[in-house]
């Protein structure tokens, strides 16, 4: 029975390379050099008989023993237990079919040992097959025992159900593997541990059966120079910035994660930053994330010393969910065609074109807007530039290349021609500005933290100028008291006049700054009472998902209405504004789902057992990546030099009345691996090299009495072109055998990939390739119940989805996006795709519907649309909408 199990295992290992979805191996050598340990437990006569039977078995496998002078004495010598020779490689694995042969070492003919002191790559076949749990335990126990021989296990390889162990060890330790690992001189932790005290199943079996010597791995690319880290709170990218001497004096904006939200005003935090961190200013505050401007990079270390700051990172930027369409996209539609297919055009013919409705459109920038006002946009269109609040002189940011805000505004205007439009430009790295806009729309135009900072700076500047005026005026009076033509008095008068001129110029600049701040405040106040807010920017990470961030919570409180379904339009204007939000366009860049670890090895599986492993892959614990260039064919190989960020976020429950020994209770880390030989030409395709791993502790970005939200990130510059895969490791930070601390809960992490370099050399996107779920959430703030989230749909002939769905990994049953529109729209002869441009049309449609008198704060239920369905006005609702002229006449 045991022999049959061994033969079954060997056959399985030999044919595994031919099964789809498995490892690719290089062409095996024809001949093998083998060394094996055998055991003949018998008296002399029986030993001779067994030895000769073993040699006959070896002869049938075409084994040729190594020539030795005393080889013929082995059959008589009870201490002889090793035998070496050559044989066909195809027969080498069959040696274990003889129960007298205990452990076999195989090396291909022509294999050369490395230089003394170097390491040998090996693949070990363990005893088995055992039951699944016992086999994994044996795998862990053997790996731990081998560490005493300085063994380093490989990562991400195919363990063949934990029957194989891969790694490297020093050349001098190689001969010891032929002997029973349970009796090695290094022992199990200590040499004197007897066998009966070893853990099971290691105690019961000879652990290593087959040792294969593998070709050496190719040399690694030159690793980057190690970074000296003065503050462990700094993210990887900030550590690199701080280590660059050329950047020490440069200003820098960062985000600090606070240990708790600021209660009341942030006045104390603002003054502490200014006084203790070299004049640093507070620019924004949302939840526990504080946006801070440092006058110079070298102040990072002092900022990290604040006791209530958990971590410091670079700002997490949102992006416009709109891009230029490619040739593979479906047939584009014009706005006029969308008006027809959605039936919004019928409302136009009935006289409803957005009259009396005010739209606010949020964008990263609005290029050439001055040229288009009164042409393609109403002459009364206003522009509010909130990037002004982020500069000390209150002047706007430079133009943002590639921004599509103007095209979104033109789409909204073409959909609702009579609506009033206010354009609001925001900094895509300032999530807090959206909350400022939301508050202003509902009649709470509070000074933002940036505006309070600018006001504080203006007061200080006014005091400085007043002090200078006293000095300059007195000097001017004294200088011109002497009108002599002598050189010294004349020079003094000239200097005093120049100082007065400079003072007057500085005072004019101060008045201009005050005027710009006042205009900014007035612009915010004028947003109050707007009916429709259209936002095309989305954030995939950096803030709590599942509608838990402060902006989503505010939208849920102030942008929703509990209305009953109505069959006809009513003549009242909506009192609750509608936030029309672009959904996520990051399909392929985002993974979300439950944390699965069915084998309990502390590595997350990206898919369940019901999901087949694709061809050429061997595990669900790795998610391979691919590169989609702007032009050209997508491929699995990532180009060298691009810089990408992986961010994983998860929420875990916490005991309400117990303190956690560690936080988070279930920490996760990220590792990026490189596949060394994807085609298995010279080494097995599952040989991977560890490229980078997250080193800092996860950061808590939200804390409630019963849960915490955490993020972990990994920034990496791809060192060389090749195929890469992501691996997620995680497990309880405390003993899982203590139920009150851990309990039973399901984690639903969400992982997003971002390019964090300028993309000038190699433009394109990095995406997941192996496992790509669609229901990973629509990003922020589209995850809010109070946001009318817009996605894009494809014609029926397209079998692949085009946008992400779901409100977030922890809200898998929530329907998001709320509505779908066409995936590609033509605007000004430009073909645009993505939820951003679709939101422009949907927001205009909401304005037209609002002009009928319908309450659109709960648009789907109010007019009978299907949640998650296309934006097509129901015929039953349209039948009850009266023409505008008839309606006006009846009201008179």
Image (cartoon, grey):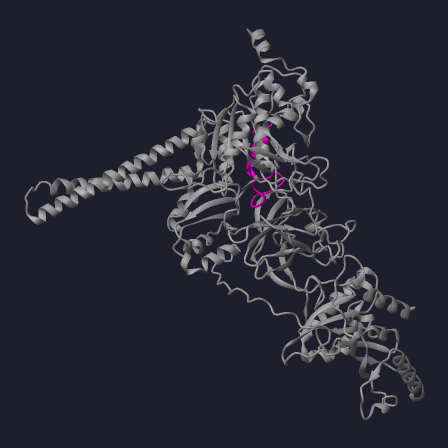
What quarter of the picture does the C terminus occupy? top right
Front position in the image: 368 or 261: 368
Whether residue 538 is visible, yes or no, is yes
Above or below residue 6? Residue 734 is above
Q: Is residue 544 magenta?
A: yes
Answer whether residue 471 is visible to the viewer in this image: no
In the rendered view of the protein, which quadrant contains the N terminus? bottom right
Q: Nearer the viewer, residue 375 or 226?
A: 375
Which residue is rendered at x = 64% and y = 33% of the image?
822
Name the foreground residue: 287 vs 127: 127
x and y percent of residue 230 in the render? Answer: 47, 60
868 relative to 404 in the view: left or right: right
The answer to whether 823 appears left or right of 311 in the picture is right
Is residue 414 depicted above or below 86 in this figure?
above
Residue 569, by quadrant, is top right
* Residue at 56% in and 42% down: 539
Where in the figure is residue 710, as x and y percent of width and height?
60, 48
Residue 352: quarter of image: top right
> For residue 890, which quarter of the picture?
top right
In this orientation, which residue lies closer to the viewer: 699 or 404? 404
| Residue 49 colored in magenta in the image | no
Image spot of residue 56 (x, y percent): 91, 82
Q: Is residue 711 above or below residue 372?
A: below
Q: How many discs mark residues in the rendered view? A: 0
First to last magenta residue range: 536-560
Q: Residue furthest bottom?
A: 69
Locate residue 674, reporting x and y percent.
Answer: 64, 61
């Amino acid at each position: 029975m045991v022999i049959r199990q061994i033969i079954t295992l060997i056959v399985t290992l030999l044919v595994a390379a031919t099964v789809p979805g498995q490892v690719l191996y290089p062409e095996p050598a024809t001949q093998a050099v083998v060394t094996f340990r055998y055991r003949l437990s018998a008296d002399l006569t029986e030993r001779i008989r067994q030895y000769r039977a073993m040699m006959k078995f070896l002869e049938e496998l075409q084994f040729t023993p190594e020539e030795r002078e005393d080889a013929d004495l082995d059959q008589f010598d009870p201490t002889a237990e090793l035998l070496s020779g050559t044989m066909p490689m195809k027969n080498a694995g069959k040696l274990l079919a003889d129960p007298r042969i205990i452990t076999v070492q195989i090396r291909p003919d022509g294999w050369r040992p490395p230089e003394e002191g170097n390491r040998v790559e090996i693949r070990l076949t363990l005893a088995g097959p055992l039951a699944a749990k016992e086999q994994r335990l044996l795998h862990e126990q053997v790996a731990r025992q081998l560490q005493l021989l300085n063994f380093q296990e490989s990562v991400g390889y195919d363990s063949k159900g934990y029957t194989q162990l891969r790694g490297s060890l020093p050349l001098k330790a190689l001969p010891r593997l032929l002997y029973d690992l349970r009796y090695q001189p290094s022992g199990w932790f200590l040499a004197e541990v007897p066998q009966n005290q070893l853990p099971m199943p290691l105690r019961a079996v000879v652990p290593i059966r087959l040792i294969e010597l593998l070709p050496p791995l190719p040399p690694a690319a030159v690793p980057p120079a190690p970074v000296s880290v003065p503050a462990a709170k700094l993210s990887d990218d900030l550590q690199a910035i701080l280590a660059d001497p050329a950047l020490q004096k440069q200003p820098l904006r960062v985000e600090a994660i606070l240990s708790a939200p600021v209660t009341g005003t942030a006045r104390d935090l603002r003054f502490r930053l200014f006084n203790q961190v070299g004049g640093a200013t507070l620019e924004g505050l949302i939840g526990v994330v504080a946006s801070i401007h440092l006058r110079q990079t070298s102040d990072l270390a002092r900022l990290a010393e604040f006791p209530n700051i958990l971590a410091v990172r670079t700002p997490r930027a949102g992006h416009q969910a709109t891009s230029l369409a490619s040739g593979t996209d479906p047939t584009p539609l014009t706005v006029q065609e969308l008006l027809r297919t959605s039936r919004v055009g019928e409302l136009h013919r009935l006289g409803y074109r957005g009259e009396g409705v005010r739209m606010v459109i949020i964008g990263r920038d609005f290029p050439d807007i001055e040229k288009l006002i009164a042409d393609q946009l109403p002459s009364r269109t206003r522009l509010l530039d909130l990037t002004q609040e982020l500069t000390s002189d209150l002047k706007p940011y430079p133009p943002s290349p590639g921004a599509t805000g103007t095209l979104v505004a033109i789409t909204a205007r073409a959909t609702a021609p009579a609506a009033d439009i206010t354009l609001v430009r925001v900094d895509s790295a300032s999530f807090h500005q959206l909350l400022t806009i939301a508050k202003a729309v509902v009649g709470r135009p509070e000074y933002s933290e940036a505006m309070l900072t600018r006001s504080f700076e203006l007061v200080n500047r006014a005091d400085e100028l007043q002090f200078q005026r006293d000095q300059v005026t007195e000097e001017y009076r004294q200088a011109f008291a002497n009108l002599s033509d002598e050189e010294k008095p004349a020079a003094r008068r000239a200097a005093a006049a120049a100082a007065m001129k400079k003072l007057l110029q500085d005072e004019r600049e101060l008045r201009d700054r005050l005027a710009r701040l006042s205009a900014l405040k007035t612009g915010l106040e004028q947003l109050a009472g707007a009916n429709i807010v259209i936002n095309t920017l989305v954030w995939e990470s950096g803030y709590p998902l599942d509608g838990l961030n402060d902006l989503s919570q505010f939208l849920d409180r102030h942008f929703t209405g509990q209305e009953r379904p109505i069959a006809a339009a009513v003549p009242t204007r909506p009192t609750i504004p509608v936030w029309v939000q672009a959904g996520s366009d990051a399909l392929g860049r985002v993974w979300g789902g439950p944390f699965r670890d069915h084998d309990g090895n502390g590595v997350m599986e990206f898919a369940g057992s019901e999901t087949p492993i694709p061809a050429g892959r061997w595990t669900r614990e790795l998610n391979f990546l691919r590169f989609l260039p702007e032009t050209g064919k997508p491929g699995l190989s990532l180009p060298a030099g691009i810089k990408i960020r992986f961010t994983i976020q998860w929420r875990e429950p916490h005991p309400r009345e117990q303190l956690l020994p560690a936080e988070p209770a279930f920490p996760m880390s990220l590792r990026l691996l490189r596949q060394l030989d994807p085609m298995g030409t010279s080494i097995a395709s599952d040989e991977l090299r560890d490229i980078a791993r997250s080193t800092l502790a996860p950061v808590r970005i939200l804390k409630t009495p019963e849960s915490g939200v955490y993020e972990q990130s990994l920034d990496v510059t791809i060192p060389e072109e090749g195929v890469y895969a992501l691996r997620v490791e995680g497990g309880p930070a405390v003993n899982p055998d203590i139920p009150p601390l851990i309990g039973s809960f399901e984690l639903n992490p969400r992982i997003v990939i971002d390019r964090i370099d300028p993309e000038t050399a190699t433009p394109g996107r990095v995406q997941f390739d192996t496992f790509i779920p669609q229901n990973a959430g629509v990003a922020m703030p589209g995850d809010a119940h109070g946001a009318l989230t817009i996605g894009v749909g494809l014609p029926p002939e397209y079998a692949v989805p085009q946008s992400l769905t779901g409100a977030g990994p922890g809200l898998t049953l929530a329907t998001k996006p709320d509505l779908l529109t066409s995936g590609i729209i033509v605007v000004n002869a430009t073909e645009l795709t993505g939820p951003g441009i679709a939101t422009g049309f949907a927001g205009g449609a909401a304005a037209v519907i609002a002009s009928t008198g319908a309450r659109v704060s709960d648009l789907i239920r109010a007019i009978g649309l299907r949640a998650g369905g296309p934006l097509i006005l129901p015929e039953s609702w349209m039948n009850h909408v009266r023409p505008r002229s008839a309606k006006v006449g009846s009201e008179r």
